[in-house]
Amino acid sequence: MLRPSTAPPRASSGWNGSKVHAARPRTATLHRNAGAGGVTAPGIKPDKPNPLPALPATSPVPPSAQSNHVSVSRAPQQKSISTTLDRYARDRLAFAHSIAELSAAPFNTNILLSEGTLSLLNPLLKDCSLHVQTSAILAVARLAENSPEAAEAIVHEGLVQTLISCAESSNRHLKRLSLLALRYTSLHASHLARAIAEQGALPRMVAALSDPDPTVKEAAAWGVGAVAGQGADLAASLASLSVLPPLIACAEEPELGVKRAAVAAIGEVAAHGPSLAHALLTHSALPPLLSLLRHPSSTLRRSSLVSISRLCHTADLAEAVADAGGVESAVRCSAEEDQAVAKAAVGVMEAVVKHSVELAQMAASFGAIGPVVDFLSRARGAAKMPAILTLTHLSCSSESLALACLASSALPALVACLDPCLVPCDLAEPDIKAAVAAAACLAQMGRHSSEHARMVGGDGVLEKMAGIATRFKGRSDFAAAPLPPNSDSKNAAVRRHSDANMFSHPPHILAPTYRQIAKILAKDPAARREMASCGALEAAQRVLHLLRPPDGPASILNSRPSLPDPTPAVAPELSLLAEAVCEINACFPDEIVRYFTPGYEKDMLARLEEVRPPPSPAAVKEDLVLPGDRVAESAPLGQVKVDGSITVERRKSRASFLVR
């Protein structure tokens, strides 16, 4: 008979290096179970006697054998449980890591969202494993960056509170990734930024600006800028949480990333009105920004210039920027080869000079005109607009500044902006805006005096300006390019507007054009003579006749399909057009205006029918009854006094006088 061995079981090394006791012989175990009426051995039928006899019920098992039996039976279960748990931990990490890698590609975002990835990542954001939690937050941040729909889902599925909790963690990686996820979520729409603010994310962002880790500071500064850029109320909420002092302190940090994020956030806060800009100046935000204009990084210099320009909301703020050296620094930066930096520098000058004549003169004294003209000559597309606007504000300020702009070769650079729009081809929107702005700038330069107009109006410039107005006559968002008055070459422009089809142009094109022509006519008799002789005055009277017909404006306006219907939307434009034509008429005598008014010939013919010609001298002599009596040659039919005492009557049937 086989009995269980009483020798101590032999230990062996398990899968994890621990000591596991060897299992008892299977035959003995099966035998014990069968003797106790338990499960029989596999492959043995119950009706046959068991070949292994059962142990006696009265023979006790030694204690050492009992403990060995328990440890041997539990060892496989512990190993299986540990293996399952380890596999679950590895699978969670592998899943979060795979989703983070897949979400890095923007074209995978929609597929991941459609499969409900965010709902699967939500419990992993609270995972006990730091690696799983970090990978899950990274995946959420990338999804929010690539898709507005993902940002919406993050807010609606309640992930914001989890991200805020992770931002309060002691681990710097969790802090940084959580703040970046909140930043990307708020970038897409203002209501998402407000939802994040309502759930308490703003105090966490402000507190993270003082974190000792620079990467956390950078992420917090980017988040503050993203939220502040979505509305003035959000920027005011951040200011009420005392965000300005730590934000300005971050701009002075040695790390480049922290500087860039802080400067961008300062610009977003300053863009929302003079009150926030004044608060930034009160907290000494301007000196760090000016000092960064000498930083080697061109991106940081450009961002600093943009933030400085956003501080100039009012004349007082612009004067504070100019007094601190902002204009001088902008003039220096406008000469850089980097077009983005130069454009931002010209934007600072434009933001300063537009407020007052004194600030414009100050900028000119710092030598701002030359660099602006040079930048306009080499700029392309939308980059031209700040330079054109700067020259426009300088030209409007005074005659001397307008002459200074012309002397600095501003005219060829502005005319070059007009040339692309005169070619019949498709143009980009920035080129069209630059052309119209350049035409307005030329008009401002030439409006001061005849000398200014002579310098502007030469070499066919006015023809190009009129061509700009004609080409874009169908655009409702552009007015006509104004014409400079008092120009010696204005006859070409006046002659262009003598076209008989001029009344078919939209009112928003005709009104400013006629108003500028009226300024020319008021100071130049030769221009009045040219307009009357070339047919331009007659065309203007036709326009006025259509606007103010004798039988009421509605009938004629509705009978002309070329003019818009007199709806309330265009009625103010029609009124402005009528006033502009009346300004032109005020420059001419009433007789000439009536002569060119439509219907003047019919009025003259009607008056001819009313006039009765006087009798000829021969007929008067034949009709005299009394020799020596004299009758006025212009005497009408009827009773006439002769020599003051004799009354005669001229009959209609025959020419004769009867003495009474």
Image (cartoon, helix red, strand yellow):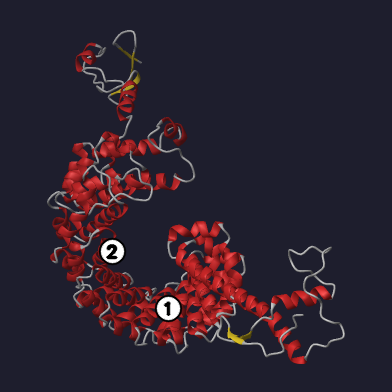
Q: Is residue 550 left or right of residue 201?
A: left
Answer yes or no: is residue 242 visible. Answer: no
Query: Which quadrant is the C terminus positioned in?
Result: top left
**N-terminal label among 1 and 2:** 1
Q: Amino acid at mark 1?
A: Ala
Which of the 4 quarters of the picture holds residue 448? bottom left
- Quick one: label 2, few (<14), some, or many (20+) residues within 10 Å? many
Q: Please give the name of the residue rendered at 14% of the width and 51% of the height, measured from the top-left corner.
A: 488
What is the x, y in percent for residue 196?
Answer: 56, 72
What is the x, y in percent for residue 620?
Answer: 23, 15
Residue placed most toward the observer, 50 or 320? 50
Callout 2: SS:
helix
Q: Dot 2 corresponds to which residue?
A: 389
What is the x, y in percent for residue 146?
Answer: 46, 63
Q: Amino acid at mark 2?
A: Leu
Q: Please give the name of the residue rendered at 26% of the width and 58% of the height, measured from the top-left corner.
A: 381
Q: Is residue 629 above or below residue 546?
A: above
Q: Dot 1 corresponds to which residue?
A: 277
